[in-house]
Image (cartoon, helix red, strand yellow):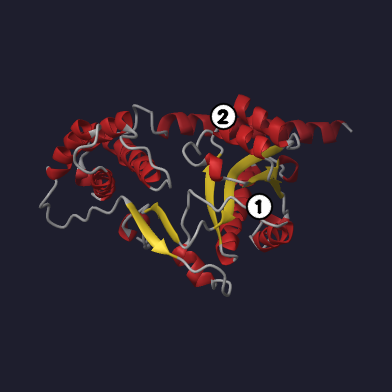
Amino acid sequence: MLRKLQILLSAQAKVIISYVYDVGNYLRYNGDSLLVPKKERLYYRIIVDAHSIEKGLSLKDRRPGFGQEKIKRLMNEVSSYDTSLGAFPLEMAVGALRAYVDLHPPGEPEQPFVETVRQFVERFNGLDGVAFTGGVQSAVLPIGGPALTLLEGLQCRRSVRYFDEQLIDRTTLLELVRLAQGAPSQCNRQATRVYLYQGRHQIDQILALQGGARGFSQSISNLAIVTSDTRAWRGSNQRNQIYVDGALFLMHFLLAAEALRLVACPLNLAVDSRVERQIRDVGRIRAGERLIACVALGPMAGTAIRFARSPRRPIDEVVSFVTEE
């Protein structure tokens, strides 16, 4: 008995030591750390702020003049950015700002601010080898028809922020989850769960706590929360696998929605512990399950949709071929 207790305490001590390492690593390298060079911090900040403008542009009911404080910050960030790290953030940001200007015809009340943005964008005209990739794009998609192939789903998956507000029938929702269960899972644990909501009041409460669906939450009539059960994992080596398994399931869930001709938008649950507890209470989620993400779902609202371009980084910034020395 004493031996078993010693083994248990040793295992728990390793968990604590590993989490202390995680905290130190995050404090050292996170995007607010002054130990990270400014240009590296700006690289990701510009991408995030540019995408927030893209998201506003992709809404069905866009508010003219939206996001002025965020746009001012984005322009300051771009002005301070050192492109020696790569032109991608600048290309994404300027493209998004161009699309913002194009949204506002001359003579609108917000025009003085829009003119400031226009003048900022014009500073980048004529840059050789620079493609301004950010903004929005539109597509006309077929309704019905055969399910998409895997390749088609990978190529056309987009986060859509407006939906037909009708409820998805339970048979379709169950098929969606069944398809998502094809996701790989470490040692086939299958610790992921899906909570589905179609009640207006409950959806509104969850989205108010999540905080990332402003401007289109009223069109969300079908909401999922993906969770992963902590009970499935043991020891210090598996401390982060809960999120790996959950994210793999989430991606399968999104691709399955695409295959079934539904549109979806993942909504992150990067919230503090207090809000996580509130979401768990409202959503009736069992204690011990960690929140992975929300997913807004629905049939397409007609065939013409608009979505953020969300351009991808150059492939040579993402891939490193490592050779033997």
**In the figure, residue 73 lies in which quadrant?**
top left
The C terminus appears in which quarter of the rendering? bottom left
- Residue drawn at the location 10% of the way across and 52% of the way down: 126
For disc 2, the marked residue is: 20
Residue ranking furthest to the right = 1
Using the image, determine if residue 205 lies above or below residue 311.
Answer: above
Q: Amino acid at mark 1?
A: Leu
Q: Residues within 10 Å of mark 2 (few under 14, many from 20)?
A: few
On the image, numbered disc 1 is attached to which residue? 167
Secondary structure of the residue carrying numbered label 1: loop
Q: CA distance from mark 2 to mark 1?
A: 45 Å
Earlier along the polypeptide chain: callout 2 or callout 1? 2
In front of the other: label 2 or label 1? Answer: 1
Q: Is residue 248 visible?
A: yes
Q: Position of residue 89 (x, y in %)?
A: 28, 46
Q: Residue furthest top?
A: 274
| Residue under the point 66% across and 60% down | 176
Q: Position of residue 117 (x, y in %)?
A: 20, 37
Left or right? Give the position of 163 relative to 95. Answer: right
Residue at (37%, 52%) from the top-left corner? 310
Element at label 2: helix
Q: Position of residue 177 (x, y in %)?
A: 69, 58
